[in-house]
Each structure stands twice: as structure tokens, then as C-alpha cells.
Image: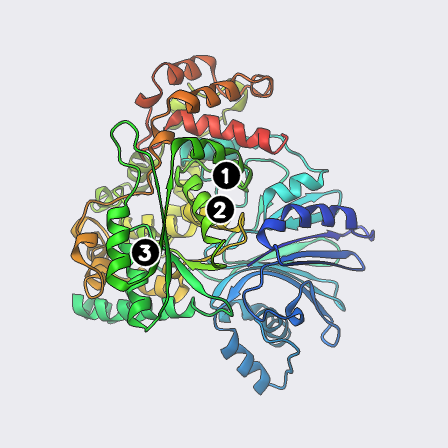
Amino acid sequence: MCGICGEVRFDGGSPSVSAISIMTDVLAPRGPDASGVVVRGNVGLGHRRLRILDLSDKSQQPMVDPDLGLSLVFNGCIYNFRELRAELEGEGYTFFSEGDTEVILKAWHAWGENCVSRFSGMFAFVLHERDSGRVILARDRFGIKPLYLSMAKKTMRFASSLPAIVKAGGIDTSIDVQALHNYMTFHAVVPPPRTILKGVRKLPPATIRIYERNGRFKDRRYFDPPYCRQAGDTQRVREDWQELLLDALRTAVKRRMIADVPVGVLLSGGVDSSLIVGLLAEAGQRDLMSFSVGFQEANGEKGDEFVYSDLIARQFGTDHHKIFVPSEALMEALPGTIAAMSEPMVSYDNVGFYLLSKEVSRHIKVVQSGQGADEIFGGYHWYPPLVNSNDVVSDYGKVFRDRSHAVLRTQLADSWIADEDASGTLLAEHLSRQGADTPVDQALRLDSNVMLVDDPVKRVDNMTMAWGLEARVPFLDHELVELAARIPPEEKLRNGGKGILKDVARKLVPSEVIDRKKGYFPVPQLKYIAGPYLEMIRDTLASQAARERGLFRDDYLERLFDQPSQHITPLRGSELWQVGLLEMWLQAQGV
């Protein structure tokens, strides 16, 4: 919906309007419709607006309520804001606007920290209390909306993207060694609070942070659903779960249609996005726009799934748009794609979402998208091997990690390798904590709360917002996820994964889409690197900046260049693309 940024001084000084202006300029693609900066005392807030709800200037940000003594910048959408507004009006609050931003202000004043638990939506916001001097930061349950932070010399800066903070200057841009370990282990995922740069951190999802006037702060995690069977769940039969799930899906999709502008769908042709289209059609949605993208094949691997997206478009009568990207257009789009990344992300479909979003943004401002279904409903191949695991930490690592710590020591230069297996420690901390009944439940909880946030969720946000397009993800509706967490793992793993979701989909979606082999967003040229793509990476890793940084061992790079198509990670990624993308991203940031 928007881009937010700001600066808070805890030393009695005044915020830098220049730094805030620089950050708002970097965030302009996220909010091309309006901008604003407000400075009050030691707090400066900046905002770029994408008009989705209440298209009038009354919902401009930063939003200030002088009667309540509150100022706010907010990115996202509160889907139940009208219900909350009615409740607040019943408590005596009056409103000057018609959107969701003002509801956050009033909700904070009425309910304090508990307001975030009442919000159904995606959000990152920063709120300043004039009278107490406190500054409150909050992020939605699954980190759908980003919030990056830096702290230097009693000055805190925040922004919706890491590059915005880097551009404002004055931070440590050296590589975080533990984050590098995560990047190389988890196919580019760096879990919060770290980022690849030492001087920039990110607020974890489902977290509310309160800064006092002196800079001290406390964090509270407000959402952590148990992955356990509740009383009565063991008596439910399959049809009971199907009925509960279908109702929850209907609610999730309906919620995400709230807007004062049209809402479309990113249609890959897979079961997830197809089900969204089917649910919208069932609800009576008309003139629905749908969008698909495809690429040239490479190494015998097909680069599109148009046969399935065409089938769904015909079945439900959508206004369908197909985008085919030839190889030369893919190459031209890579610099823009990399520049749009808040953090380096190796998934090939970054460029697909980037080009798709460019086209979609010419037609509409809001889309629904199918991200999250695999992590919530057990759609990936690494879940079945965990069913009978007696050591979930080790077994998860075997099927999920790109490489072991021992192998990584042969690939990273000595000065860049962590002494201990930092990524293994992180897995142990997350997988071993209480609140999950089985090894599969433990893995699903980790993926939905950590890996999902900094891979598909971040990817979609970055690439869509690069073109002022808002993506909404109904499979991450928090009530839907709470229900899914209770469903027994065996119901999810059936039928090649996502069994219970496929059961529901059969009520709406053609079987040809459901029963086919699982597909991905294919970009073969970046998996089987050759020709100009190979030369681009070779030039990047041979550059003076890369040589001076010296992240990787020379013999490792030589092996990759000798046989680039032979070095594929367990999750089907190119090792050469992984190391080359990191260096390209660092250089794009001027680091």
C-alpha cells in the first residue's frame, strides 16, 4: 500500500529532514500517489502513498491526531477496519477520514498494545505518542509488510526497504558473518532480526516494539499459534476439516477484496491461485482480471504454465492477460529486479514477479496471490521424510539446507566463515521449542513463521511494490493459519502434499489443475546458466569490488564456472546464481 520511513533521536537532537527525504525518494515506487514528511520534536516521519482505501486527501500520511496527541505512518491494509471503526465509534471516538489509517490511531489510544491482536490484515506501522515521547513499532503476524531498522549514535532510522536506509548514509555496511552463513545455508533466507549488512536489522514478524524517550525498548511477540491438536480435534473426520477449511478460505479471500479500487489475481495456473479465482467466482465476483507470466525454455525445461492458467481463465471467465518474456527481455530486467530487492533473494521467480507486476500495474493497483499455501498446508517435498523422525533438527537440515557447515567451510573464504554452525543452531532453537505435536508440525511452524517471511512473502512484496502494486495473500489470513495448524499432518501430506487443500479445491477447480505434477514459477535461464547470463556473473565475480571483498574461495568459483549446470542445490537452485546474485546485489547498493 505504501512506503514508510523516519528518524528518531534519543539524544535530544532534531531528526534529519534531509535523511528522511532521501528515504522517501527511494521509497517512491511503493507509493507513487502522494508523499509527506512530519517532524515533531525528536521524531520525524516520512510516507509515500498508494491510494487503495479512502482515495481522498483526508487519509494522507503521516497522519496526525492533535486531540489524541498521536502521529502515525502505516504500510498495509487492515481488512476489518470498518468493524473496528464501528466498535470505536461506540466507545465515543469520532473520525475525520474513511480509511484504515485513522482506525489504527484510535485503536491504539483505546486498546494500547492489544490493538494489534484485533487487526486482521498486513501491516507495518510506527506511531509516536506526543505526551509520553514513546515510539511504537509493529509488524503483522507473518511479516507481509517489511520494517527495517538501523541504530547509530543514539539515532534510530526505519524504512520499508533496506536500500532506503543505506541511501540515507551513516550506517555500517559491512557483511554480517552469521547472516552470510544463513544466506548460503537457507537459499538466501536471513531470519530476523539480522540482514546481510551489520548496520541494518529488521523487526521480526508478530512483534510490537516500544521505545521509551531515552531509547530503551522492549519487544513483545503477540502471535504464536500452537501446532497442536485441540480438545475435540481428534474426533473430527476428514469431511469436518474440509468444511471448516472451506469456510475459512472463503472468509480469507473475501476479506482481501476490500478496496476502493479493483482487485485482480496473479494466476500461475497452480492449485493455490486457481482456488482463489474459484472462490472469487463463487462469491459472485465479476470482471475479474487475472495475470500470468512465462519464459523461454532452457535445457529442455519448459518456462511457462500457460496451459493451466488458460484453463482456469476460461473456466471462470476472467479478463486474462498473458505475458511472455523472451530471453533478451529477461536479461534487460535483471538490473531492475536486483535493485528492487530489499535483501538479496535467489529465487528465480523474482524476475517473473517483477515483470508481471510491471504489466499488472498498468491495469490495477491490487491483486491477490497464492503465496504461503505450501508452508501452511505441507506442499513441499521435505515434509514427508520427517514423518517418523527421531531427530527433527538433523533430518530437517538434511532435506532443507543448501549445504552443511563442513561443506560451506570449503566454499567461503576463511575470513568469512563463522566458527560454529550458526544456521544449525538457529534450526535447533526454532524446531525444539514447545508447542508443536509432531516433527512435521515443528517443520511447518518453522517454515510458516521464519522461512516463509524472508523468501516468498518478501519476494512478492518487493517485486510488486517496485511498481506500486499491492499484493494480498489470503493463505496467510491469521485465522486460516490457526485452523491449519490444528489439522493433523497426515491430512496435509496426502496426495503428494496439500491433500486437505486439494480436497477443498475439487469443489471448485478442474481436476486437471489439481492432479498434475507440482509446478514452480520456472525461469530456466537462471537455473541452467549459460551464454550472456554466465558472462554477466563471471564479470561480476571478477570485478574489483568482488575481489576486494573476497567472500568465496577461488577454487570453489572455478568449479562453478567449469560446470555451472551441475551445481544445483537440494532445493533445485543454481549455486552459481546464488553466489553471483549476492555480489550483484551488494554492488547495486554501492556496498
Residue under label 1, please give it.
337
Can residue 372 be seen at all in this image of the molecule?
Answer: yes
Picture quarter with the N terminus: bottom right
Spatial distance from mark 3 to mark 2, Cα to Cα? 18 Å
Identify the secondary structure beneath mark 3.
helix
In the depicted view, which residue is nearer to us: 171 or 430?
Answer: 171
Q: Secondary structure at mark 2?
A: helix
Name the residue rendered at 64%, 44% in the picture: 164
Residue 403 left/right relative to 10:
left
CB under 8 Å between discs 2 and 1: yes
Residue that badge 3 annotates: 273
Q: Residue at x 31, y 51 (%)?
A: 374
How far separated are the C-alphas under marks 2 and 1? 7 Å
Around disc 2, counting alpha carbons within 10 Å, would you say few (fewer than 14), some (14 to 19), or many (20 or more)? many
Residue 555 lies left or right of residue 64; in this view the side is: left
Q: Is residue 237 visible?
A: no
Q: Quadrant of residue 71?
A: bottom right
> Few, some or many C-alpha atoms within 10 Å of disc 1 (few <14, some 14-19, many ≥20)?
many
Image coordinates of residue 450 in percent, x first then y, are: 43, 48
Quadrant that contains the C terminus: top right
| Precedes in sequence: disc 3 or disc 1 | 3
Position above or below: 459 against 48? above
* Quarter location, residue 282: bottom left
The residue indicated by pointer 2 is 463
Front in this rendered view, residue 458 or 369: 369
